[in-house]
Amino acid sequence: MTPPLIAVFNGPNLNLLGLRQPEIYGTTTLDDIEAICAEVADELDLAIDFRQSNIEGELIGWIHEMRGRAAGIVINPAGYSHTSVALMDALLASDIPVIEVHISNIHRREAFRHHSYVSHAATGVICGLGPGGYALALRAMAGILTQDDDA
């Protein structure tokens, strides 16, 4: 049996993790996070498609691509969380579970970061737990998929 596919999408500036504002985001790189996700996915018998883009339209295209292909989406929309109705709409149209991840606690930061359009499309949100939030998101997604199988 083919393992369920989980898309792990990352938004703008996350390619600079480890370099950009380490006092907020730490020194873990996006490559390190991809390795963590691959390890957890193997443990949970999931397949992952891990990508990053600084381009809103590219992220939207990837989300459309996952409709009918992936079992779920884990997304760190980064700055697009607070600005992109289009990203929210694409996630709503995907018709699959979505877990939103943020490395920092967006609710302890600047006021404009407290609102996320993406949260309106998310089954769940994990924020403020650092890079480990991705592993938690994959574990939560596995639990959601198991619940769906039991229905």
Image (tube, rainbow, N blue to C red):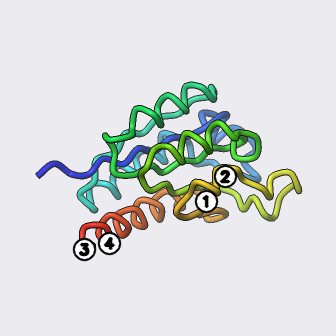
Front position among marks 2 and 1: 1
Residue designated by label 1? 130
Q: Circle 4: is it few (<14), some (14-19), or many (20+) Cα within 10 Å? A: few
Residue designated by label 2? 26
List x then y, in percent, for residue 33.
48, 48
Q: Find numbered disc 1 in the image and state the secondary structure of the residue it sits on.
A: loop
Q: Earlier in the sequence, mark 1 or mark 4?
A: 1
Front position among marks 1 and 3: 3
Residue displayed at 48% across by 45% down: 32
Residue designated by label 4? 147
Q: Nearer the viewer, residue 92 or 84?
A: 92
Q: Circle 2: is it few (<14), some (14-19), or many (20+) Cα within 10 Å? A: some
- In this view, the residue farthest toward the left is 1
Residue displayed at 78% across by 56% down: 115
Q: Nearer the viewer, residue 29 or 14?
A: 14
Residue displayed at 60% across by 42% down: 89
Give the residue type at disc 3.
Asp
Q: Earlier in the sequence, mark 1 or mark 3?
A: 1
List x then y, in percent, for residue 47.
28, 47
Residue designated by label 3? 150
Residue displayed at 67% across by 63% down: 128
Q: How far apart are the alpha carbons under marks 2 and 1?
A: 8 Å
Image quadrant for the C terminus?
Answer: bottom left
Q: Earlier in the sequence, mark 2 or mark 4?
A: 2
Q: How far apart are the alpha carbons under marks 1 and 4?
A: 26 Å
Whether residues under marks 3 and 4 lie with C-beta atoms below 8 angstroms apart, the answer is: yes
